Amino acid sequence: VVGPGLWIWNAFGTGWQTGLAPALWITVFASLVLFAFFAASMREVWRLTPLLFPYLGIIGILATIWLHQPSQPLHAFVPSSWITFHILVSVLTYGLLTLGAVAGLAVVLQERALKLKRPGRLTSRLPSVADGERIQVWLLGAGAAILGCGLLSGMAAQFFQTGALVEFS
């Protein structure tokens, strides 16, 4: 959490960044923060670690590769409270959906190991199928609900900027 958090603090100190690398680092940071929160509050979430950390490591490597691609800091643009809320909701959605997808992968791997009757070292560290499905459904449900809030906040921000709820561009 600290590494990506410091990178974001440094990169976003001059304003909101619009490049691919900042978006990937934001996703890594949000996923780690949510993982820490849910691992502390839900007993079996910590068992997603063998899948989540390598995935976030790959995302971090990709973000580092694209680090020198041009991004546009939005210096002149001061986001309104609606847009700030919209960004926070969207980042929260990224994190929840990332964790939900990793929980889904854990379920698929566990089911495959059960069907083949060959549990491995990886599957023995993952949550059970029932726990994995419960975690997955909860995270994806929360992600969908928050995504709905993100859509509504985006429409509100659009309305306050242009007077139209939806503007197709």
Image (spheres, grey):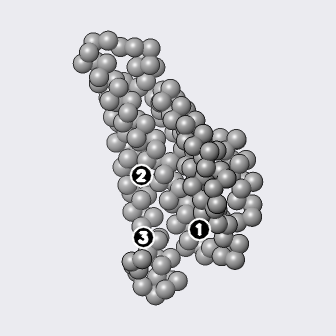
Marks 2,1: beta carbons within 8 A? no
Residue at 48 percent across and 30 percent down: it is 51
Kind of residue sitting beneath label 3: Leu
Residue at 50 percent across and 76 percent down: it is 157
Query: In the orientation shown, which residue stands out farthest toward the bottom?
Result: 163
Question: Which type of secondary structure does the marked residue at label 3 adopt?
Answer: helix
Query: Marks 2 and 1, Cα distance to the nearest angstrom?
Result: 18 Å
First in residue order: circle 2 vs circle 3: 2
Kind of residue sitting beneath label 1: Thr
Question: Of the numbered discs in the image, which one, if any, rests on residue 121?
Answer: none
Question: Which type of secondary structure does the marked residue at label 2 adopt?
Answer: helix
98 sits left or right of 88 in the view: left
Quadrant of the image occupied by residue 74: bottom right
Query: In the orientation shown, which residue stands out farthest toward the top?
Result: 118
Residue where numbered disc 3 is placed:
152
Residue 124 in sight? yes
